[in-house]
């Protein structure tokens, strides 16, 4: 069974551009549009709200908020309002964020997995209209209650998870998993085994929503598309690799299930960081492990590759220089 397919937008894009692309996504047959909030870039909530108003059916997801710079009570307040505005189309992902960015704000990045667990418990209870008292390892609340009735008390709450500890927590408390755009398909396959075992140990069903972010370039010209995707994925891989120096679980998630060995991966990314052209350094293994790119046959094969690994929804980042055109091309043929 093929997954449903959405589109990823982010705070590096102007709000009006996101509004335009959200409309293109809906008209092209995509199921959802997800907004990634990057550190110190545009906050995505105003853009998500604007896109909810300018679309009619497409789901509007936040992927993700972190509870360090948005307290769990604020997440509940904002997501209830977004769900109200969108007539029940909002989706929520919560993750721990990037530790180095959070520490630059003068905040302690203590117990990130516990912080996400606390946030999920608090947000879920508030969305149900409960008066919440909760003592967590990072976040605690006393007698808090949302001041209006959220339209969907059972809004699914997904968790972004990269390390095994986070995956086990996801299996225990979340309604779904969000997989980074820098993880290969095999990571999702392994992650689902961890989720299922953890959920069983907790006496609950395994999370049903499995969303995998994937960079995408779709063109009539196969070589053009597969060449065009290399520089953007090299940039993202390099950035994540650098962050992984301080957070080893990130590097492990990126490469432990890749078809590329750790030493070769590090050497090739090092060459790109040293100034060599990504188009000359990265081969097809990088394209196939970290993107869906090429002509329609390549895109069909890529969707199947990620679906067979267990993704129930692919959220594509159209990272070429013509995202609207690529989106329309992909949607007209495959959706």
Image (cartoon, rainbow, N blue to C red):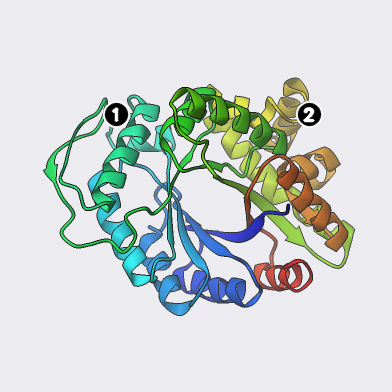
Asked if disc 1 and disc 2 are in contact, CB closer than 8 Å, the reply is no
Give the Cα distance between marks 1 and 2.
Answer: 34 Å
Label 1 residue SS: loop
Front residue of this view, candidates 247 and 66: 66
- Tell me if 148 is positioned left or right of 48 in this view: left
Circle 1 residues within 10 Å: few <14, some 14–19, many ≥20: few
Judge whether residue 245 can be spotted in this image. no
The correct choice, above or below, for 129 with respect to 252 in the image is: below
Label 2 residue SS: loop
The x, y position of residue 305, in whole percent, is 78, 45
Q: Residue at x 58, y 36 (%)?
A: 240
Q: Quadrant of residue 278?
A: top right
Q: Residue at x 45, y 78 (%)?
A: 54
Front residue of this view, candidates 230 and 111: 111
Q: Residue at x 58, y 74 (%)?
A: 26
Dot 1 corresponds to which residue? Answer: 108
Comes first in the chain, label 1 or label 2: 1
| Label at residue 260 | 2
- Tell me if 188 is positioned left or right of 127 in this view: right
The x, y position of residue 284, in whole percent, is 85, 42
The correct choice, above or below, for 324 with respect to 13 in the image is: below
Q: Quadrant of residue 51?
A: bottom left
Quarter that holds the C terminus: bottom right
The x, y position of residue 90, in whole percent, is 42, 61
- Tell me if 81 is positioned left or right of 31 in this view: left
Q: Quadrant of residue 311?
A: top right
Front residue of this view, candidates 227 and 329: 329
The x, y position of residue 259, in whole percent, is 79, 30
The correct choice, above or below, for 157 with respect to 201 in the image is: below
User: How many discs mark residues in the rendered view?
Assistant: 2
Circle 2 residues within 10 Å: few <14, some 14–19, many ≥20: some
Q: Residue furthest left?
A: 143
């Amino acid at each position: 069974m093929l997954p449903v397919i959405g589109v990823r937008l982010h705070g590096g894009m102007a709000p009006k551009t996101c509004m335009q692309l959200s409309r293109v996504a809906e008209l092209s047959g995509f199921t959802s549009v997800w907004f990634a909030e990057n550190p110190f870039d545009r906050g995505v909530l105003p853009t998500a709200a604007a896109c909810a108003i300018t679309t009619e059916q497409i789901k509007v997801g936040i992927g993700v908020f972190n509870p360090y710079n948005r307290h769990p009570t604020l997440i509940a307040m904002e997501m209830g309002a977004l769900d109200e505005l969108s007539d029940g189309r909002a989706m929520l992902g919560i993750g721990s964020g990037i530790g180095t960015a959070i520490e630059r704000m003068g905040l302690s990045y203590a117990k990130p997995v516990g912080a996400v667990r606390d946030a999920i418990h608090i947000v879920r209870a508030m969305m149900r209209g409960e008066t919440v008292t909760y003592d967590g390892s990072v976040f605690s609340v006393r007698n808090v209650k949302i001041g209006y009735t959220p339209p969907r008390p059972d809004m699914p709450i997904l968790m972004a998870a990269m390390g095994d500890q986070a995956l086990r927590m996801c299996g225990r408390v979340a309604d779904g998993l969000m997989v980074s755009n820098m993880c290969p398909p095999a990571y999702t396959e392994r992650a689902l085994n961890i989720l299922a075992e953890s959920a069983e140990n907790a006496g609950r069903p395994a999370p049903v929503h499995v969303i995998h972010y994937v960079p995408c370039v779709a063109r009539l010209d196969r070589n053009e598309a597969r060449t065009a995707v290399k520089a953007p994925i090299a940039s993202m891989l390099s950035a994540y690799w650098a962050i992984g120096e301080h957070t080893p679980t990130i590097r492990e998630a990126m490469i432990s299930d890749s078809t590329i060995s750790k030493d070769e991966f590090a050497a090739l990314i090092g060459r790109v960081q040293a100034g060599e052209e990504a188009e000359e350094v990265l081969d097809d293994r990088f394209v196939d492990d970290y993107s869906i790119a090429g002509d329609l046959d390549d895109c069909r094969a890529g969707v199947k590759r990620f679906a067979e690994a267990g993704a129930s929804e692919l959220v594509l980042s159209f990272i070429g220089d013509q995202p609207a055109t690529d989106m329309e091309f992909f949607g007209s043929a495959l959706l």
